[in-house]
Image: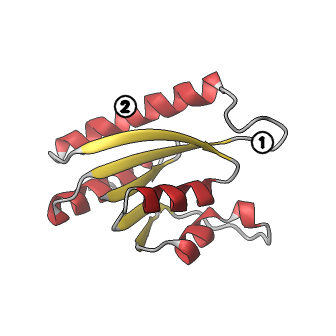
């Protein structure tokens, strides 16, 4: 299983296409994950309709891309306090062999600002970070 992390950004298509190409080669399905970060002053399971709607729309669009590669996929939305820990937890739950996510450089000492560093440091599988140059081939 390949875990592709979708964020609602312009890089989602690139992350999805990269994960799909690799999944086709490796003969693995793709698990598309969209994480909604819930602020600490709200219950973790609080429904956030606008974020849920955005996540569902984004996942639907990315599932169309995966289907072009003729690869099986499943989309999921999780709510968490911190995306990094949700990504690691999901990767372990599905026994992912690979995580693909967008690379975002953050110059901050705050753990919650550095999702890429957290995932790379805590993943029990390979991690590929993508940077979208705008030249999707």
The colour scheme used here is: secondary structure
On screen, 114 above or below 80?
below
Quarter assignment of residue 50: top right
Q: On residue 133, which mark appears?
A: none
Please tell me whether mark 2 or mark 1 is closer to you in this view.
1
Q: 18 left or right of 85?
A: left
From mark 2 to mark 1, how far is it between C-alphas? 25 Å
Residue 135, image x, y percentages: 35, 56
Number of numbered markers: 2
User: Would residue 111 be seen by someone viewing this image from the given angle?
Assistant: yes
Residue 47, image x, y percentages: 65, 26
Q: Residue at 61% of width from left, 53% of height from top?
A: 83
Question: On the image, numbered disc 1 is attached to which residue?
Answer: 39
Q: On residue 60, which mark appears?
A: 2
Q: Residue at 35% of width from left, 49% of height from top?
A: 31
Q: Residue at 77% of width from left, 69% of height from top?
A: 108
Nearest the viewer among 77 and 12 is 77
Q: Identify the mark nearer the N-term, 2 or 1.
A: 1
Q: 29 left or right of 57?
A: left
User: Would residue 134 be seen by someone viewing this image from the given angle?
Assistant: no
Secondary structure at numbered mark 2: helix
Quadrant in which the C terminus is drawn: bottom left
Q: Residue furthest bottom?
A: 121
On screen, 107 above or below 33?
below
Q: 34 left or right of 23?
A: right
Quadrant in which the N terminus is drawn: bottom left
Quarter assignment of residue 124: bottom left
């Amino acid at each position: 299983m390949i875990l592709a992390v979708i964020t609602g950004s312009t890089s989602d298509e690139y992350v999805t296409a990269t994960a799909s190409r690799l999944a086709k080669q490796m003969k693995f399905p793709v698990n598309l994950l969209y994480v909604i970060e819930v602020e600490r002053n709200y219950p973790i399971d609080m429904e956030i309709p606008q974020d849920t709607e955005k996540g569902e729309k984004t996942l639907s669009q990315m599932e169309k891309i995966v289907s072009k590669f003729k690869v099986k996929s499943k989309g999921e939305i999780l709510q968490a306090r911190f995306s990094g820990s949700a990504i690691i937890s999901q990767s372990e739950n599905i026994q992912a062999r690979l995580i693909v996510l967008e690379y975002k450089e953050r110059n901050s000492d705050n753990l919650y600002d550095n999702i890429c560093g957290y995932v790379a440091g805590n993943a029990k599988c390979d991690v590929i970070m993508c940077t979208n140059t705008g030249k999707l081939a």
